[in-house]
Amino acid sequence: MTAGAAVCYHRRGGGRAVRRRAAGGCRLGGRVIAIRRVLVYGDPLLRRKAAPVGGDLGALRPLVEDMFETMYAEPGIGLAAPQVGVSERLAVIAAVADDDAGRNVGRPVVLVNPEILSRTSDLVLFDEGCLSVPDITAGVERPRAVRFRYTDLEGATHEREAAGLLARVVQHEVDHLDGILFVDRLSLLKRRLLRKRLQRLGVVARA
Ligand code: ZN
C-alpha cells in the first residue's frame, strides 16, 4: 500500500471541485486522506484474484476514503482495491445512472465482496477506459443489466439490479477483483491493434 501523492481535491459548496496542494495528503476530520498511486497495466497484482474481505469492516474506512479521493482526482467513476495495491474484494463506484435511459442517478456506493448473481443475455457495446490502462479506451460488449449482491461497510448485505452505467461499472470492477482487465474482453483484432500501446504500459509499470 503506497500512500500519498501531493494533490488533494476538496468538494466545497455547490459541489465545485477545489484543487489544493498539501504535502503528503489532505487533512479532513483529523485524518490525512491520501490520493494513492494507481497500479498500471503490467503490474502482476492487477492479475491476481483478490481475497474475500473479512473481519471488522469498519477498519476499511480509511482505505475506502482514500479510494474515493483517488477515483475523483483521476478522475474515474469506479476503482477496485487491487488498483491501489490492496488485493481484497472491495470497490468504490461514483454516483452514476442505474437505468438504460441514464436518468436514475443513484449515490456513490462501496461494494464489499460483490458478486454478480445473474446477467441479461442481451449485450451492449460501450466505450470503456480504466485508470490502470491510461489513455486507452475501446468498445467492450457486456450484458446490458445485472443482478448483484454486496455487503456495505456497516455489514448489511444488499441485492439489487442495475442497467445502464452502473451495470457497466459493477461488471468492470468485479472483473478487477478476478484479475481481469477490460482489454482482455476485446476481440482478438482490437487487442492486436492495441498490442504495442499495451506493451509500452507494461514497460512503464515495471520501470
Ligand atoms: Zn478499471
Image (cartoon, grey):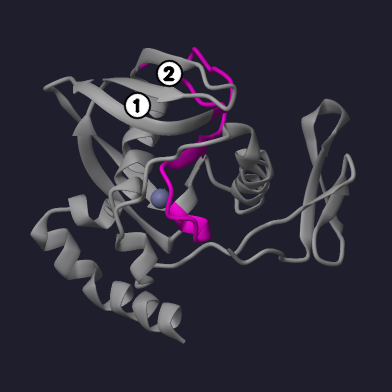
Q: On the image, which quarter does residue 175 sit in?
A: top left
Chief secondary structure of the magenta portion: loop
**Residue that appears at 44% across and 81% down:** 204
In this rendered view, identify the residue nearer to me: 160 or 152: 152
| The furthest residue to the bottom | 207
Say whether residue 32 is magenta: no
Q: On the image, which quarter does residue 184 sit in?
A: bottom left
Q: Which residues are magenta?
A: 82-109
* Mark 1 secondary-structure assignment: helix
**Residue that appears at 24% across and 44% down:** 140
Label 1 near ligand 1 (CB < 8 Å):
no
**Residue that appears at 19% across and 23% down:** 119
Kindly identify the amino acid type of the residue bearing the numbered disc 1.
Ala
Kindly identify the amino acid type of the residue bearing the numbered disc 2.
Asp
In which quadrant of the rendered image does the N terminus lie? Answer: bottom right
In the displayed structure, 99 sits above or below 73; it is above
Numbered disc total? 2
How far from the left and from the top, in percent, is residue 173? 38, 41
How far from the left and from the top, in percent, is residue 155? 53, 22
* Mark 2 secondary-structure assignment: loop
Per the model, the C-alpha gap separating discs 1 and 2 is 7 Å
In this rendered view, identify the residue nearer to me: 107 or 88: 88
Disc number at residue 167? 1
In the displayed structure, 11 sits above or below 69; it is above
Q: Residues within 10 Å of mark 1 (few under 14, many from 20)?
A: many
How far from the left and from the top, in percent, is residue 73? 66, 51
> Does the CB distance between marks 1 and 2 fall below 8 Å?
yes
Residue with the mark numbered 2: 98
